[in-house]
Image (cartoon, grey):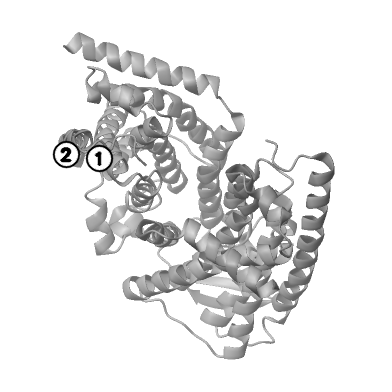
Amino acid sequence: MFLRTVLAEARKNIKQYFFTARALFWALALPLGNGLYLYFLYLPFGSRTVNLEFTSRVFTLDLAGFTLIGQLLYSFFTMMLLAGVAFDAERWQGTLESVLLSPANRIAILLGMALANTLSYVWLLMGVMFSWVMFLNVSVVISDLPALLASVLLSYLSLVALGMSLEAFCIHSRRAHMYVNMLQEPIMFLSGLIFPLQSMPEALLPISYLLPLTFGLISVRLTLLGGASIFDVAIPLTILGIMIIIFTASAVWLVGYAERNAKAKATLTQF
Amino acid sequence: MVFHSLRVVVAAAKFNLIITLRFFSGTAIALRLFAPIMTLGSAWVLYNQIYRGALTPEFGTLDYLSFITIGNAFYVFVFAAAFVVGRVMFWERATGTIEATFMTPMNRLAYMAGIMVAAAINSLIDFAAVFIIGILFGFHATSFNVLLFLASMFLTALALFGVGLIVNAVTLTLRDRTTTANTLMILFLVFSGLVCPIELMPQWAQTISKALPLTYGLKVMRASLLGTATFDLVYELATLSVIGAIYICVGALTLKLIERNLKKRALFSVF
C-alpha cells in the first residue's frame, strides 16, 4: 500500500509537470546556462583550476568540473525545494482536502513527490553531463569508487529528506512559493557552490554548515575530481548521514502536526 | 495616426504603472535584487579572497568589480523591461482581455511600446539599486559620458523591444509563459559578457554572443562609465542599431502573422 502510494504520487507529479518537450528542454537549459555563467565568472582570473581546502589538505580541482558538479547538485537541491511547494500547489488546485482525506500514508505522498523530481533529474543529469564533457572537456579523477558512490548516495538522500521536510513545512504557509524562491540565491552563495568554502567570510560559515548541499558539494567534488578516498570525506559523509535522520524525522513530525493543526482550525484550504 | 499611436503609448504606460503601484510589493523588489547581489558578492570573494586581485592580462586594464556591477545593473534593467513585453499577450489571455485588446483599432506596436515604457520606468529602480549596492562592493565610475550612456540604454531597449515582440508571438502560439522567455533570459545572462569579456569565452560562445544586442549595449555602457571610449564604439553602436532594427522588423512581422492566424482559426482565448 505504501509503495503503491509512492508510485501513484510520483506518476501524478510527472504527468502534471514534466509531460511536454518544452518542460524537458527547460529542465536542461536552466542548469546548463547557470553552470556556464559560473564558469565564465572565473575566466577573467585566467586559472583553469580551483583549490579546495578540506581538513588541512588542499585538493586542486578542474574548474569546469568544479562548476559542473556544483550546478548539478544545486539543480537537484532546487528540485527538492520546488517539491516542497507541492502541498501548496494541491491547495490552490483545490485538491488538498481530498489528498489528506484519503487513507494514504502522508510520508508516502511526500516520497512520491520527491521521486517524481528525482526522475526528472536523471534527464537533467545526463543532458548536462554530456554537454559539459563535449564542450568543456571536464577531467575526472576517481581513486576510490565506493567513496564516490557513498558521496552521491548520501548527498541524494539528504536532499530528498530535506525536500520532504520542506514539503511538510510548506503546508503551514500560504506563501510557500515565495519562500522557496527567496531561499535559492542565498543558498547558492552560502553552500560553496560558486567558490570554495575556505574563502567564505567566517561570520557566514555557521549558516553554510546547516545546509546538506554544503557537505554534498565537498564530498562529491573531492571524490569525483580530486581523487579523495573514503577517509578524506568521512566527516562530510557522517554529517550527511546525521542530516538524513534529522530531516526525515522532522518531516514525519511536521506533516502530522500541520494536518492536525489545520483540521482543528479549519484552515486547510483557506487562503 | 502618429498622434493616435502616441496616445496609445501613453495610455498603455499609464495603465501599467497604475497596476504596478497598486500591487507594489517590497518583497518582490527585494527578490529581484537577490541575483545581482549574489553575483556581486561572489565576484568580490573571487577577486579579493581567492585571486587577490590578480587578473589575466587579456582582461585588460578595466576595474573588475566595476565591470561586473555595470553588467549586472544593465541586465536587471533588461530583464525587468524586455521580458515584461514578452509576456504581455500571455497575461492578456490569462486574464480574459486578449480579445478585447485585439478588437480595438489601436496600433499593436504602440500598445507594446507603452508597456515597455512602463516596465523601463519600473526597472530603473532596480537599475539604480544595483549601482548603489555595487558601490559597497567596490564599484567606481571613472568617467560619465552622458551621450554614450543614454545611447546604450536607448538602443539596447529598442533591440530588446524587438526580442520582446518575438517572444510575444511565440508565447501566443505555444501558450507558454515561461519556457521561451526564460531560455532567452539565460542566453542573455550567459553569453552577453555580463561577468567576463566575450573575448575570453570559447569560440562557440562568442558566436552566440555576437547575435545578442545586449553584448554591444554593454560594451557601450561600460565605455561610458569606465572611460574606455575608442573608435570601436562606432562599430558597436552601428551593429547595435542594425541588430535592433532587424529584431523589431522580425518581431512586428511575426506578431502580425500570428495575430492573423489566431483570428482565422479562432484560437485567441483557447488554452
**Residue at image location 31% in from the left, 30% down from the top:** B153
* Pointer 2 local density, CA inside 10 Å: few below 14, some 14–19, many at least 20: some
- Residue B96 located left or right of residue A103: left
Estimate how packed mark 1 is, as few (under 14), some (14 to 19) or many (20 or more) residues with alpha carbons within 10 Å: many
On the rendered structure, is B155 left or right of B238? Answer: right
Q: CA distance from mark 2 to mark 1?
A: 7 Å
Query: Up-down: is A47 above or below B176?
Result: below
On screen, residue A203 versus residue B202, left or right, reads: right
* Residue pointed to by mark 1: B166
Left of B16 or right of it: where is B28? right
Residue A86 x %, y %: 61, 53
Q: Which mark is residue A209?
A: none
Chain identifier of the residue bearing label 1 in the image? B
Residue sitting at x 81%, y 57%: A256
Say what secondary structure mark 1 lies in: helix
In the rendered image, which quarter is residue A162 located in? bottom right
> Residue at point 50% right, 63% down?
A14
The disc labelled 2 sits on which kind of residue? Answer: Val
Q: Quadrant of residue A222?
A: bottom right
Residue A20 placed where, x, y %? 38, 58
In the rendered image, residue B198, in percent from the top left (x then y), is placed at 30, 54
Q: Which quarter of the rendered picture does the C terminus of chain B lie within? A: top left
Residue that carries the numbered disc 2 in the rendered image: B250
Q: Closer to the N terminus: mark 2 or mark 1?
A: 1
Q: Residue furthest top?
A: B3
Q: Residue at x 48, y 29 (%)?
A: B128
Looking at the image, do the residues carrying marks 2 and 1 touch, with CB atoms under 8 Å apart? yes
Q: Of helix, strand and loop, which one carries label 2?
A: helix
Which one is in front, B35 or A25? A25
Q: Is residue B165 above or below residue A193?
A: above
User: Three-letter amino acid code at disc 1?
Assistant: Ile
